[in-house]
Image (spheres, grey):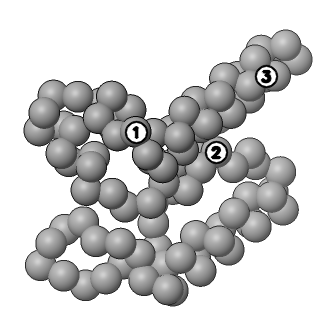
Amino acid sequence: MKIIALRHGFRFDSALYFTPLTATGLEQADNLVEILKDEKIDFIANIPYDENFTKAMTMGKTIVEFDSGNIKQILEDSWKKINLATNKTNNTN
């Protein structure tokens, strides 16, 4: 099984390193999902920018331990998709 991790598109220009995607960046992300479909590559998740990642790290926690909102759900759903894809691949070998 191959795993491909792709980074975001255009983001807001700022002195801060981490900034949310611009409208163009969001459009690029949506287009990428369509390209993955066309290439028959499983899409796992589009994880939005969230400062809680940094807050969790500074507190010595994972984001799933720290956050009870949208990011936690996205990551839990992603893990389920990865497990399903891994099991599917292992069963065909």
Label 1 SS: loop
Q: Where is residue 18 drawn, in percent x and y?
A: 24, 66
Q: Residue at x 22, y 38 (%)?
A: 56
**Which of disc 1 and disc 2 is earlier in sequence?**
2
- 22 vs 64, nearest the viewer: 64
On the image, numbered disc 2 is attached to which residue? Answer: 44
Label 3 SS: helix
Kind of residue at badge 2 = Ile
* Residue 51 placement: quadrant: bottom left
On the image, numbered disc 1 is attached to which residue? Answer: 68
Image side of residue 31 versus residue 79, left or right = right
**Which of disc 3 and disc 2 is earlier in sequence?**
2
Mark 2 or 3: in front is 2
Q: Where is residue 91 drawn, in percent x and y?
A: 84, 13
Contact between labelled residues 3 and 2, with CB atoms less than 8 Å apart: no
Q: How many marks?
A: 3
Mark 3 or 1: in front is 1
- Residue 10 at least partly seen: no
**Which of disc 1 and disc 3 is earlier in sequence?**
1
Kind of residue at badge 1 = Ser
| Alpha carbons under labels 2 and 1: distance apart | 20 Å
Query: In this view, which residue lies farthest toward the right?
Result: 92
On the image, numbered disc 3 is attached to which residue? Answer: 89
Classify mark 3: residues with Cα within 10 Å, few (<14), some (14-19) or many (20+). few
Q: Residue at x 69, y 63 (%)?
A: 33
Image side of residue 31 versus residue 47, left or right = right
Eyeballing the image, is 40 above or below 64? below
| Alpha carbons under labels 2 and 3: distance apart | 15 Å
